[in-house]
Image (cartoon, coloured by chain):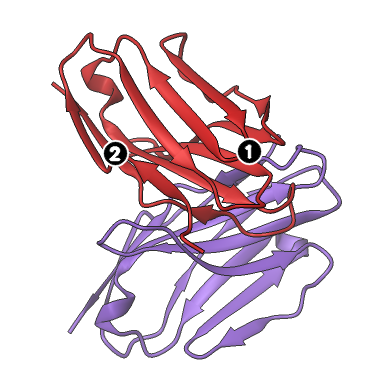
Amino acid sequence: DAGVIQSPRHEVTEMGQEVTLRCKPISGHNSLFWYRQTMMRGLELLIYFNNNVPIDDSGMPEDRFSAKMPNASFSTLKIQPSEPRDSAVYFCASRPDRENTEAFFGQGTRLTVV
Amino acid sequence: AQKVTQAQTEISVVEKEDVTLDCVYETRDTTYYLFWYKQPPSGELVFLIRRNSFDEQNEISGRYSWNFQKSTSSFNFTITASQVVDSAVYFCALSGNNQGGKLIFGQGTELSVKP
């Protein structure tokens, strides 16, 4: 299995631009998580899906952030417009069921907004 | 509400010392799962262990051991005879059966093992 695949691995963009991060979960996994990691705030859960349906998006910072999961094999996290404070590493993770197994993480996308 | 607290932000030890990383959690769920992950300098998150709330047996895997105590809501992680390669950030995480599968992490403990 290829594991959770995230793209791009690195993204540098200018403030105000739209940024789209992509994630392909492990085949057969039905839960997907988006996390943001910064030095100040640690590993924050932004949103998670179960069977392609958003279950909890209370961690999404503001309306500039949106996430979709159009099918079981693909999810996006979009920031529009981006701001320098959005600079962080964004991780996607998936797991096979709702709560009793470990989540498998992608390599992360390092986003820098200048 | 669920919460995971790792009070130790940074720990520095000398190689071969034993070190314990603390994790305290809060949940109202009767069934829940606890996890430890390792994040080495390369940045990926590596799963180490999972424990469910009904299994309080301590677990040992090589130099790693975990002590789960429901009475104190703690799930501590001990590395025996630490090595330089153990240098990483370690995260404790919690998932409860009434939270819809939400998986939350503590702030992490950065462990530095010096030769």
Sort mark 1 into few (<14), some (14-19) or many (20+) by Cα contacts within 10 Å: many
Up-down relation of residue A38 to residue A99 (above or below) = above
Task: Output the chain of dot 2.
Answer: A
Q: Which residue lies at the image location 19% right of the left edge and 13% below the top edge?
A: A15
User: Residue at position x 49%, y 43% from top?
Assistant: A24
Vertical position of residue B49 compared to residue A84: above or below = below
Q: Respond whether the residues carrying marks 1 and 2 are from the same subunit.
A: yes
Residue B67 point in image, percent of width and height? 64, 75
Q: Quadrant of residue A78?
A: top left
Q: Which mark is residue A72?
A: 1
Q: Would you call the spot at circle 2 few (<14 residues within 10 Å), some (14-19), or many (20 or more)?
A: some
Q: Amino acid at mark 2?
A: Pro
Q: Amino acid at mark 1?
A: Ala
Q: Is residue B54 left or right of residue A26?
A: right
| Residue drawn at (13%, 21%) of the image | A114
Report the front residue among B112 and A46. A46
**Where is mark 2, residue-wise?**
A8
Coordinates of residue B78 in the picture (x, y in percent): 50, 78
In which chain is the residue bearing label 1? A
Q: Position of residue B89 (x, y in %)?
A: 36, 60
Q: Colour of chain A?
A: red
**For the image shown, how many numbered marks are present on the structure?**
2
Q: Nearer the viewer, residue A69 or B31?
A: A69
Q: In the image, residue A45 lies at what x, y percent?
A: 52, 35
Query: Residue sitting at 39 percent across and 44 percent down?
Result: A6
User: Is A39 placed left or right of A48 in the picture?
Assistant: left
